[in-house]
């Protein structure tokens, strides 16, 4: 049997120790510990970053989180009507729709987002008002869905007695942003009950967050067969008008609105709205309104 030289046996532990030392050095185990200040600085930066994130997150939530819908009461709408009409005893506008404040039972919701930031929807109050008042020789109908969303539409009559939509204004507020819109129709003749479909073309301009959005609304207006609706226990004959518009431009989508107009009074007995406009901002609404009383408040 061959025996290893004594020299080899004496140097083996030293070689092993050297290898262990090299591995420890390579792993960073044998180096000096970093100064405690370096850990404290790193922790301080992390805490500061977290604080900034919380502040920014809170600010974004404040700006974009929707406020609850604030109802416009009948008393508020009546005060508005009296302040603008001048003569509360005015009985009719253009000999058709009795002027005053009408009450509607409402259901539905709307959602608005700016710059792609999602915002939860808000529910339309259970009671909304419609203010009818003269606008020169025409009629202005102001729909008060809530304090944060009102719309005014101006209707006139042509030489044949057909209904003409001339303009609409819109006010809508969500969180820290206010949207103001103005619509003008170059082709707004809606015709009369029994007429065939009419081409409608309107231009909508929305001012929101310092930006102007231009939207073209093109489609048709058509009258349906008369229907019978009940209002406060009374059966009324209604003429159904459907406005079906396609939106293009800075916002794309659709605007569909159905109105059941009382044959004698002209006041909407029922209104259904289905709106979806999407792009740099999003405006969506599904609403149903049913008239509660044929006699307006003045």
Image (tube, rainbow, N blue to C red):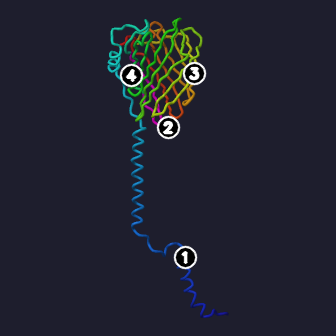
At label 2, counting other C-alpha atoms closer than 10 Å, the crowd grade (few under 14, some 14-19, many 20 or more) is: few
As drawn, 99 above or below 176: above
As drawn, 15 above or below 1: above
In this rendering, which labeled residue sits more in front, label 2 or label 4?
2
Residue under pointer 3? 218
Quick one: SS at disc 4? strand
Quick one: SS at disc 1? helix
As drawn, 32 above or below 74: below
The answer to which image quadrant residue 143 occupies is top left
Along the line of sight, which residue is nearer the eye, 182 or 176?
182
Residue under pointer 4? 127
| Mark nearer the N terminus (3 vs 4) | 4
Along the line of sight, which residue is nearer the eye, 161 or 104?
161
Query: Which residue is located at x 39 percent, y 29 percent?
Result: 69
Residue under pointer 1? 23
At label 3, counting other C-alpha atoms closer than 10 Å, the crowd grade (few under 14, some 14-19, many 20 or more) is: some
């Amino acid at each position: 049997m061959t025996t290893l030289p004594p020299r080899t046996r004496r140097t083996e532990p030293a070689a092993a120790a050297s290898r262990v030392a090299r591995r420890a050095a390579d792993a960073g185990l044998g180096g000096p510990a970093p100064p405690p200040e370096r850990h404290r600085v790193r922790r301080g930066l992390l805490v500061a970053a977290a604080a900034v994130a919380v502040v920014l997150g809170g600010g974004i939530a404040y700006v974009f989180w929707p406020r609850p819908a604030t109802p416009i009461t009948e008393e508020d709408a009546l005060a508005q009507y009296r302040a603008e009409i001048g003569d509360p005893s005015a009985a009719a506008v253009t000999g058709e729709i009795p002027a005053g404040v009408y009450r509607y039972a409402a259901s539905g919701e709307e959602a608005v987002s700016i710059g792609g930031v999602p915002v939860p929807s808000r529910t339309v109050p259970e009671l909304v008002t419609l203010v009818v008042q003269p606008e020169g020789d025409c009629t202005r109908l102001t729909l008060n869905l809530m304090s944060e969303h009102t719309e005014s539409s101006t209707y006139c009559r042509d030489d044949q007695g057909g209904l003409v939509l001339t303009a609409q204004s819109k006010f809508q507020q969500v969180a820290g942003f206010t949207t103001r819109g103005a619509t003008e129709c170059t082709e707004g003749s809606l015709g009369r009950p029994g007429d065939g479909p009419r081409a409608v073309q309107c231009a909508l301009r929305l001012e929101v967050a310092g930006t102007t959005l231009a939207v073209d609304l093109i489609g048709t207006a058509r009258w349906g067969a008369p229907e019978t609706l009940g209002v406060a226990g009374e059966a009324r004959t209604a003429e159904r008008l459907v406005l079906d518009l396609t939106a293009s431009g800075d916002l794309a989508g659709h605007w569909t609105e159905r109105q059941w107009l009382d044959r004698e009074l002209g006041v909407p007995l029922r209104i259904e709205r289905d709106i979806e406009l999407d792009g740099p901002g999003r405006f969506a609404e599904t609403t149903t309104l049913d008239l509660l009383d044929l006699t307006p408040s003045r």
